[in-house]
Amino acid sequence: MIKHHPSAETLLSHAAGTLAAGHALVVAAHIEGCAHCQAELARLEATGGALLDEISPAAMEPEAFAELLARLDEPAPPPPPAPRQAELALPPGLRLPKVLKTAEIGRWRWIGPGVRHAKVRLPWAREQTLMLLRVAGGRRVIHHSHGGAEFTQVLWGGFHDHTGQYGPGDIGEADETTLHQPVADEEGCICLASLEGGLRLPWLSRLFGG
Amino acid sequence: MNAIDTPLFLAPSQTRVPPVTALDAAAPDAAALAALIGRVAAARDRTAFAALYKHFAPRVKAYLVRAGMVGGEAEDVTQNVMLTLWRKAEYFDPARAGAATWVFAIARNARIDHARRKREVAMPDMEEPEAPDTAPSAEALTLAAERDTRLRGALNTLTPEQRQIVQLSFFSDTPHAAIASALNLPLGTVKSRIRLAMGKLRAVLEEGL
């Protein structure tokens, strides 16, 4: 049962296409498994459609349609090559979200006691800081604040912090005003996280930042 | 009708078609647009595509211009959006979304992709649902049309200011700053105004269910 959804503003930015690429991927991972947010997104996109329909049109160049007709039989460009993905050891039953198929995924690396991460890179937006995080049972992810927004989608296990309990399918949203200290549940926790501005801890942002 | 009353050859001045504007164009309704996409999917129907182009290309271009692209860029990206419509028509499923909604999603993705183009790697296409096996039923088309009509009705219940907020949220590259400057609001109150406008839209939509 999903308890934590993206905020209304976040879904709106996602529908409008103005959410940063890294956050958009995490939000898409949430939507993939959340019927409630799928319906919400459909409603927002329909609003976009209605606005598009009533926009005051801008005339195309006179030859534009003829030029396009000449291109209709061109073959579609080939799909991009499959990104490099490390074979990650994952708990049985955990399937990575489909949206990750387009991302490069690195190996698990130790970044602190009980905490490992695997870098996730978007070939079309390499500057974004994204990662899979695996935290052992009962471990804290370190007390940290953010240089910007952070999205965390729980894929397996769970964690809790001062805002509540997060289980599989839940998404956490934190911003620069949040100081949080998530603690993994007993079985541990694997999540997909996007950070904006990196963590405000010099040694960690060096590891995460990339 | 007597053929003599309808001359085949008109003087050039009489043949000039006045520019079509939003006001005088009888826009095809949502069900008609969905049916046109269905014809492209089923038979690569170029006549249907021409009608879709006439309706959507100038709207997509206007959307991209409002999102901050200059004329030439907006024109090129619009062509790509229309080409995607042609190629992916079979993925359109009116049971899931109306025609304008589907085209909006393609245009939005093209806009995100364009912003990224200098990085050489294109963003992957939007997640494609399974292409529907069969042509959409008349019932599905009617449902889609009703949903679109309801949405347009909901937009009409907003105050002009709320409507502008919703428009800028969808069209502007930097919605918060754009709303603050268009409505002369402090940045701090923009979020709550967006929330109010979107909340009202939602309430009206839910009433209609």
Image (spheres, coloured by chain):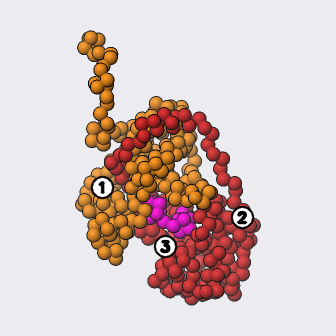
Chain colours: A red, B orange
Give me the C-alpha separation between circle 2 and circle 3.
29 Å
Per the image, is B160 magenta?
A: no
Q: Where does residue A16 sit, x and y in percent of width and height? A: 44, 60
Question: In the picture shown, does residue B108 fall above or below A197?
Answer: above
Categorize mark 3 by other alpha carbons within 10 Å: few (<14), some (14-19), many (20+).
some
Q: Where does residue A105 sit, x and y in percent of width and height? A: 69, 67
Categorize mark 2 by other alpha carbons within 10 Å: few (<14), some (14-19), many (20+).
some
Question: In the picture shown, does residue A42 fall above or below A128?
Answer: above
Chain holding disc 2: A
> Which quarter of the rendered picture does the C terminus of chain A lie within?
bottom right
Tag 2: amino acid: Gln
Q: Residue at x 35, y 46 (%)?
A: A57
| Residue located beneath label 3 in the image | A4
Categorize mark 1 by other alpha carbons within 10 Å: few (<14), some (14-19), many (20+).
many
| Residue located beneath label 2 in the image | A85
In the rendered structure, find residue B155 and report the number of the disc placed on it. Answer: 1
In the rendered structure, find residue B90 and report the number of the disc placed on it. Answer: none
Instruction: State whether residue B21 appears in this view.
Output: yes
**Over which residues does the magenta segment extend?**
A13-29
Comparing marks 3 and 1, which lies closer to the viewer?
1
Q: Where does residue A182 sit, x and y in percent of width and height? A: 56, 84
Give me the C-alpha separation between circle 2 and circle 1.
45 Å
Comparing marks 2 and 3, which lies closer to the viewer?
2
Q: Is residue A127 left or right of residue A112?
A: left
The quarter holding residue B26 reads top left
Instruction: State whether residue A43 appears in this view.
Output: no
The mark nearer the N terminus, 2 or 3, is 3
Q: Are marks 2 and 1 in contact (CB under 8 Å)?
A: no
